[in-house]
């Protein structure tokens, strides 16, 4: 991030304590970014066009950094903001204590969309098509609508997500439109980071639940690492990310085996991919790289268009910004974008939580339902709700 953006650095906890709804926050294991105000705003469905417009906007901006959110598909617009003020400091997780659960109160209503039975039916239909060879993988999501007795403050959810997910990419991003909704979440997955001529991507695919019993937790991790079904799903994602970065890089380093990564709710298989930009690739900003990679098979499936079409057919809602990306890019082209999973849309007294899972020919509908329930736990715990649906 630019020196201008770093000029107002402060204590991480103090910085996040000052967050207010409508601002942008992005907290990683390395940094905390808080952006406020709107100097310039760019929206549109073509992210490459937005990327091409940024240099002109940066040329006259006091803060040559853009922050924002990308949607899952072009059914919703991307939103980039050159903020009036931006502050950046070190990681905030260690400095944040959990806020009391009573702040939000007991939910008035919790509704699964689709129902558990309907989600399993959708998975079964996807498995049938996969076994017929129509595609290799599809990601199917479900939503959980939670209504509270009073308006939900995104700052409360953000605070507890930061406190509870020290290795996550935790965010609060205002969404375009008249409703003043906010996307909040804590994603385990780095879509892409650019630092000078170096690029990094850390795709995740393959999931197992965590357990409070250390012995069972270790067994879950071991079963995940040994699962041929989960490793196949993971390899599809890694191959796609490598091919997406290849046109921009002169060389890449790709581990031959995935590693186990974890959140407080689930285990994942992850592969850290690093690359060096070619001479022509140095013109590609972090935003352009994100647009070139998105959506990966981790959130969509493969082949991309067939998988996206099937997901839209089988899911009874539009994803909008779930499974999109959240992050920032500066005038030098450096930046960082995380996949917007383990997230919820906050709108007044309601929150819509999202969770999905990768479906391959060997998938079991009951196991896929359980996986989404485990993933809901990231947001539910931040809200003080201990039961998953």
Image: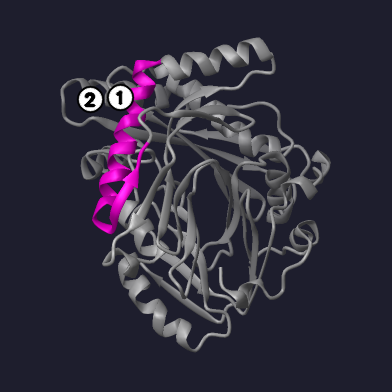
- Magenta residue span: 227-254
Q: Which residue is mark 2?
A: 130
Can residue 113 be seen at all in this image of the molecule? yes
- Reply yes or no: does residue 164 show up in magenta: no
Q: Quadrant of residue 226?
A: top left
Q: Quadrant of residue 228?
A: top left
Residue at point 41%, 71% (across, down) = 43
Q: Residue at x 26, y 67 (%)?
A: 280
Provide residue 331's location: percent of width, then percent of height: 47, 75
Q: Which mark is residue 262?
A: none
Instruction: Using the rendered view, name the quadrant where residue 231 is placed.
Output: top left
Number of other residues with Cα within 10 Å of mark 1, as a class: few under 14, some 14 to 19, many 20 or more: many
The residue tagged with tag 1: helix, strand or loop? loop
Q: CA distance from mark 1 to mark 2?
A: 7 Å
From this view, report whether residue 374 is shown above or below residue 336.
above
Q: Is residue 77 visible?
A: no
- What is the x, y in percent for residue 11? 79, 61
**Image quadrant containing the C terminus:** top right
Q: Any mark on residue 360, and which?
A: 1
């Amino acid at each position: 991030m630019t020196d201008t953006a770093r000029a107002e650095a402060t204590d991480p906890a103090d910085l996040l304590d000052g967050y207010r709804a409508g601002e942008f926050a992005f907290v990683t294991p390395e940094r905390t970014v808080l952006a406020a105000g709107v100097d310039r705003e760019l929206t549109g469905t073509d992210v490459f066009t937005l990327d091409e417009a940024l240099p002109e906007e940066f040329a006259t901006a006091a803060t040559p950094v853009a922050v924002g959110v990308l949607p899952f598909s072009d059914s919703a617009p991307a939103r980039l903001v050159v903020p009036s003020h931006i502050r950046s400091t070190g990681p905030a997780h260690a400095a944040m204590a959990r806020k009391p659960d009573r702040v939000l109160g007991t939910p008035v209503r919790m509704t699964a969309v689709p129902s558990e039975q309907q989600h399993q039916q959708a998975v079964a239909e996807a498995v049938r098509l996969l076994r017929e060879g129509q595609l290799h993988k599809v990601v199917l999501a479900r939503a959980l609508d939670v209504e509270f007795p009073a308006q939900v403050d995104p700052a409360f959810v953000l605070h507890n997500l930061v406190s509870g997910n020290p290795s996550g990419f935790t965010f609060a991003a205002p969404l375009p439109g008249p409703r003043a909704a906010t996307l909040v979440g804590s994603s385990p997955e780095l879509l892409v980071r650019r630092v000078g001529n170096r690029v990094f991507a850390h795709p995740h695919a393959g999931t197992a639940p965590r357990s409070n019993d250390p012995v069972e937790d270790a067994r879950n991790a071991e079963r995940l690492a040994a699962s041929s079904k989960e490793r196949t799903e993971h390899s599809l994602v890694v191959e796609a990310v490598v091919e997406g970065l290849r046109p921009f890089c002169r060389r890449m380093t790709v581990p031959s085996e995935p590693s186990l990564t974890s959140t407080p709710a689930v285990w994942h298989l992850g592969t850290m991919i690093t690359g060096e930009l070619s001479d022509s690739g140095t013109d590609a900003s972090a935003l352009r790289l994100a647009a070139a990679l998105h959506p990966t098979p981790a959130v969509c499936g493969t082949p991309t268009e067939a998988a996206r079409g099937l997901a839209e057919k089988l899911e009874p809602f539009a994803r909008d910004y779930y499974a999109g990306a959240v992050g920032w890019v500066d005038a030098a082209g450096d930046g960082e974008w995380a996949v917007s999973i383990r997230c919820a849309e906050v709108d007044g007294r309601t929150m819509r939580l999202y969770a999905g899972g990768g479906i391959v020919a060997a998938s079991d509908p009951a196991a896929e339902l359980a996986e989404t329930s485990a993933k809901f736990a990231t947001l539910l715990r931040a809200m003080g709700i201990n039961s998953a649906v």
